[in-house]
Amino acid sequence: MSNNKAAWDDFWRKSDGFRHEDVYSLINKAKFDYLKSLIPPKGRSLEVGAGEAHLSAYLAKIGYETTALDYSEEALKLAETNFERQGVTGNFVVGDAFGLPFEDRSFDLVFSTGLLEHYEDPSPIVREMVRLVEPGGLFFSDIVPDKFSLLRAFKSWRRQPDGMDGFYERGFRKEEIEKILADARLHEVEVIPAGVYPPELPLLHRSATYRRLEHAFLTFTGPFWKRLDRTMIAEWLGFYYLAHGVK
C-alpha cells in the first residue's frame, strides 16, 4: 500500500472495520490465540503500525499494559474507539516505525500485524522493533505476502478502497522472513504458514446476511481450517505467515 501518510489517513478515515463480524474478525482472533500461547499472562506490549489495534485490545483484556503506535492519526482514532467498545484502556502514540520513540528494552512484547509486507526492505523496522524488546522478550509479526492465497483467490475482482491504487505488498518466502529475524539477532525463530480460509466472494461479501452466514460457517468449521496451519497446504494456499523470535 502507498506509504504516503495522507493516503493512509484517507484510508483509515473511510474504514468501516467495526461494522460486522466476518472472516477477518475470526482471523484476528486466530492470530491472538496463537500469540497468547507464546507470552506470559501479563506484561507491556507495543503494536507497531497498529491500525485499529485489534490484537492490542485483546491483550488489554487479559491484563497487558498496551501501547498502539501508528503514523496515521486517523488510524489511532479508530484504535481508541475499538478500545472503548471493548471496555479497555491503552496508550496511543503517533510515530514512525523507522524511528520508534521509546527507549531500548521498554517492552516485553513488540509486534505488528500486516505491516512488514508493505515495505521493500522491512529489515530496519524489524531491527528497530527488536531494539525495544526486553532480553527474553518476544518479537511477533504476522506477514501477509504478495502471493496466491485461497482467501484472496478473487482479489482482482475486488475494487481497491479510494486512494489505495498502487497497493503494495512484497512477496516473501518463509526462508526470507527467517533470515530477516535471524539478522536482527533473534533466536528461537519460527515462521509458520497459516491462514487457509475459503475464498472471499467480493460481490456477496457486501451483503450483511452473507457475512453473518460466513462467520457462522467458519466458526463451526474452525478446527478444520486451523489444522491446515504449518502444512504445505498452508504454504501454498495460506493468507499469512506467523513469525516470531526471542531476544
Image: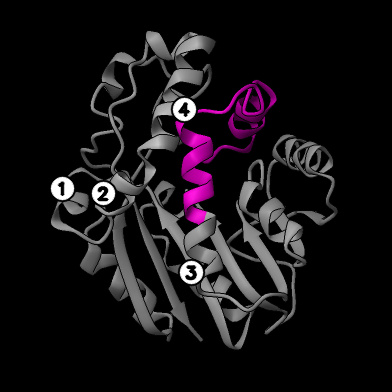
Observer-nearest of 38 and 110 = 38
The residue that disc 1 covers is: 236
Tag 1, which secondary structure? helix
The residue that disc 3 covers is: 126
The three-letter code of the residue at mark 4 reads Ala
Q: Which mark is residue 132?
A: none
Q: Earlier in the sequence, mark 4 or mark 3?
A: 3
> Closer to the observer: label 1 or label 2?
1
The answer to whether 135 appears left or right of 84 in the picture is left
> Closer to the observer: label 2 or label 4?
4
- The range drawn in magenta is 2-31
- Would you say the magenta stretch is mainly helix, strand or loop? helix
The answer to whether 167 appears left or right of 232 in the picture is right
Residue displayed at 63% across by 43% down = 51
Residue displayed at 68% across by 47% down = 71
The three-letter code of the residue at mark 3 reads Val
The residue that disc 4 covers is: 216
Q: Earlier in the sequence, mark 2 or mark 4?
A: 2
**Between marks 1 and 3, how big is the CA–CA gap?**
25 Å
**Between marks 1 and 4, how big is the CA–CA gap?**
25 Å
**Between marks 3 and 2, how big is the CA–CA gap?**
17 Å
The answer to whether 234 appears left or right of 202 in the picture is left
